[in-house]
Image (cartoon, coloured by chain):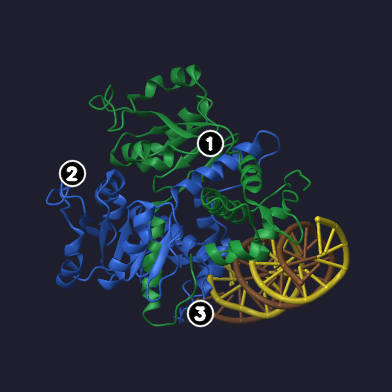
Chain colours: A green, B blue, C brown, D yellow
DNA sequence: TGCTGTGAAACCGTTCACAGCT
DNA sequence: AGCTGTGAACGGTTTCACAGCA
């Protein structure tokens, strides 16, 4: 039941699994389930019981021996661990098809996350709005917009060659994290959390598996 | 210089790095560079020399001792390893904003990858076309379409609750791989390569880092 | 009794350092 | 001399198995 300071380094694998665990807990809570064991979580949601316990152990003690975890309580404490207990204001740079789709998507506008603006440098787009009404503004206004309200996360949906300069603009505007969708690796920027999500790499990964799966038996993958 | 059968299991980390290596090689080739050492690759593209050599070692011998790698040759052999030496026909299920953006995107229509159709079950969308002209067809026609031309990869851009049935439709149509963008984990399907790309998890990852970075020093991340 | 929390063991991936080839 | 290919050392993560508590 005790809380613990997060250790110096928690692996990305662990936080990834905690996100999945949180999603499972949300489902159980909606179903009105009060208590659940790591074993039950594992069976129902395709997780691993020992791993759930080990992952949680890095942040404290969350369960009751002989009983399991209280769903609501664990969910709320994990929300706090993941920083999901406060709102996150986001902007999207690049008002192309992908940028607009992301800005409008449910995924980017739930659970405290919210896209407040799109930015572009194309005169024909500036002044308009996405289909759900997110305003498209001139990227030159980004610093001013950041002064009006804190922007924590910047999403890059610009061409690869525009990524480095876009990252600088975001950093100068005080944005603290970047999610980069362009097919180029944005190197770590001091003072900024950077996550590269390269869609072409996912396709190439499938291509590799297709190239080998026809021959040999199937390895387990997520 | 010898080729080698791929081992039973190559880690996703390795194939991911090979994709990045391939991208670097394309750049070098365009620049007309003939030969490059693992050291030079590491310095210029932010990779690790020993790791490049170890990754390659899993598939054979590609270099010349005392010299390095011949850019063009290595690029072509890696293309073969990754299965990128043949075209990959794709369809996108779900003609919402995200589905259309993906179907139209350069990333999904280069290097042999090509999106030939969108599928949806919304009458108002069926019969139309995406902005770049990809036809939107009735999902009921998917099996017939798959008989006309081999479809290797199905991209899921449907709501979470539609994912399981969409996966079944794709499998029955003979599609061999699924790239799932819905915020739900699609469990491995026998005979199918499945890759889950959950955009909400990337945001939650950044949220976790933001929640900890303010306090403590910065860990290195990609 | 039942399930958590956790040391210990097993496993896997990365880094090191050098033998061997050109 | 220079750089690859690779065995060996290292470090981190996952799995195991059980002590300890409700």
Q: What label does residue B184 carry, if any?
A: none
Disc 3 to disc 2, how far (Cα)? 43 Å
**Residue B102 percent coordinates (x, y):** 29, 50
Q: Nearer the viewer, residue B61 or B94?
A: B94
Q: Quadrant of residue A138?
A: top left
Q: Do dots 1 and 2 share one subunit?
A: no
Cβ atoms under marks 3 and 2 closer than 8 Å: no
Q: Residue furthest left?
A: B127
Residue at 79% across / 46% down in the picture? A2
Residue at 48% across / 17% down in the picture? A148
Depicted A189 relative to depicted B71: above or below: above
First reached walking from the N terminus: tag 3 or tag 2: 3
> Would residue B50 be visible to someone looking at this image?
no
Q: Chain of mark 2?
A: B
Look at mark 1 in the image and give the residue it sits on. Answer: A177
Q: Quadrant of residue A159?
A: top left
**Residue C2 percent coordinates (x, y):** 72, 67
Q: Nearer the viewer, residue B132 or B83?
A: B132
Look at mark 2 in the image and give the residue it sits on. Answer: B131
């Amino acid at each position: 039941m005790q809380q613990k300071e997060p250790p110096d380094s928690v692996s990305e694998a662990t936080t990834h699994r905690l996100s999945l665990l949180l999603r499972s807990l949300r489902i159980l809570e909606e179903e009105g389930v009060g208590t659940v064991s790591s074993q039950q979580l594992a069976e129902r949601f395709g997780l691993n019981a020992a791993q759930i316990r080990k992952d949680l152990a890095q942040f404290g003690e969350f369960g009751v021996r002989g009983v399991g975890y209280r769903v609501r309580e664990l969910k709320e404490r994990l929300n706090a661990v993941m920083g999901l207990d406060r709102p996150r204001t986001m902007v999207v740079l690049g008002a192309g098809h992908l940028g607009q789709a992301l800005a409008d998507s449910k995924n980017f506008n739930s659970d405290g996350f919210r896209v407040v603006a799109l930015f572009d440098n194309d005169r024909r787009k500036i002044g308009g709005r996405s289909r759900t009404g997110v305003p498209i503004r001139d990227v030159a206004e980004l610093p001013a917009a950041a002064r009006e309200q804190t922007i924590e996360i910047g999403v890059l949906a610009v061409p690869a060659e525009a990524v480095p300069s876009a990252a600088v603009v975001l950093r100068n505007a005080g944005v603290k994290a970047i999610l980069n969708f362009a097919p180029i690796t944005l190197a770590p920027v001091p003072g900024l959390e950077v996550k590269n999500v390269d869609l072409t790499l996912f396709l190439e990964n499938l291509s590799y598996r297709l190239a080998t799966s026809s021959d040999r038996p199937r390895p387990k993958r997520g």
